[in-house]
Amino acid sequence: MHRIAIRNGRSPFEFALVSVSAASGLLGLTMPNPGPSGSIARAFGELTPAFYALQLVSAVVVILGAAWPRYSVRHLGLGMRIERAGLIPLGGVCASYAAANIVMTGRTAIISALLIGGIAAAAWIRAQIISNDLKRVDELLELEPPSRATPKEGAPEEEAP
């Protein structure tokens, strides 16, 4: 049988991007005028607070999943699933921000849209890597011996002598 390796995948760069995304979402929610990028307010209108709230919540979910304790294979899989659950909407928020910038501002927003679009692509690529690693985690869980605490379903319980 071959060895199953699961990559950690987290780096200070990734943590910094997710932390800045959380801070950006928080500032977008709390500041009366989030800044010169009024294209978001023009593009999303009344949904602008929901946009920033989704950005904040998804970034916090990614941080929670990345910091989840990994005491066993089951804990590892749960933390990875939580992290992936935050990465997918975070990528969507970044992609919609990049698209709104280009549509509402024009050619002058291409550089910022490329940067934010790159963050969206990185979030989705990381989510795909986690999905691949979760397949390995599921293989490990299948190889793990069953717990003696509960009998298997359908199996007759042993009688005490």
Image (cartoon, helix red, strand yellow):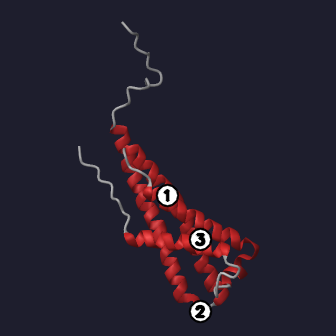
Q: Nearer the viewer, residue 105 or 76?
A: 76
Which structural element holds mark 1? helix
Q: What's the residue at 59%, 70% (across, down)?
A: 93
Secondary structure beneath label 3: helix
Q: Which mark is residue 93?
A: 3
Q: Which mark is residue 64?
A: 1
Q: Nearer the viewer, mark 3 or mark 1?
A: 1
Judge from the rendering whether residue 43 lies leftward or rightward of residue 10; answer left or right: right
Secondary structure beneath dot 2 equals helix
Residue farthest to the bottom, as pictured: 108
Front residue (pair 102, 26): 26
Sequence-wise, which precedes: disc 3 or disc 1? Answer: 1
Residues under numbered marks 3 and 2 in contact, where contact means CB atoms less than 8 Å apart: no
Q: 156 above or below 54? A: above
Query: In the rendered structure, which disc, 3 or 2, sits on the residue that comes first in sequence?
Result: 3
Amino acid carrying label 2: it is: Arg
Q: Please indicate whether residue 29 sits to the left or right of residue 78 in the image.
A: right
Q: Give the alpha-carbon distance from disc 3 to disc 2, as whole Å.
A: 21 Å
Residue 7: image quadrant is: bottom left
Q: Amino acid at mark 1?
A: Leu
Query: Tags 3 and 1 in contact by the CB under 8 Å rule?
Result: no
Q: Position of residue 11 (x, y in %)?
A: 37, 68
Image point (64%, 71%), residue name: 52
Residue 142 picture location, percent across and down? 37, 38
Residue at 64 percent of width and 88 percent of height = 36
Q: Which mark is residue 107?
A: 2
- Report the residue that reaches farthest toward the right: 46
Mark nearer the N terminus (2 vs 1): 1
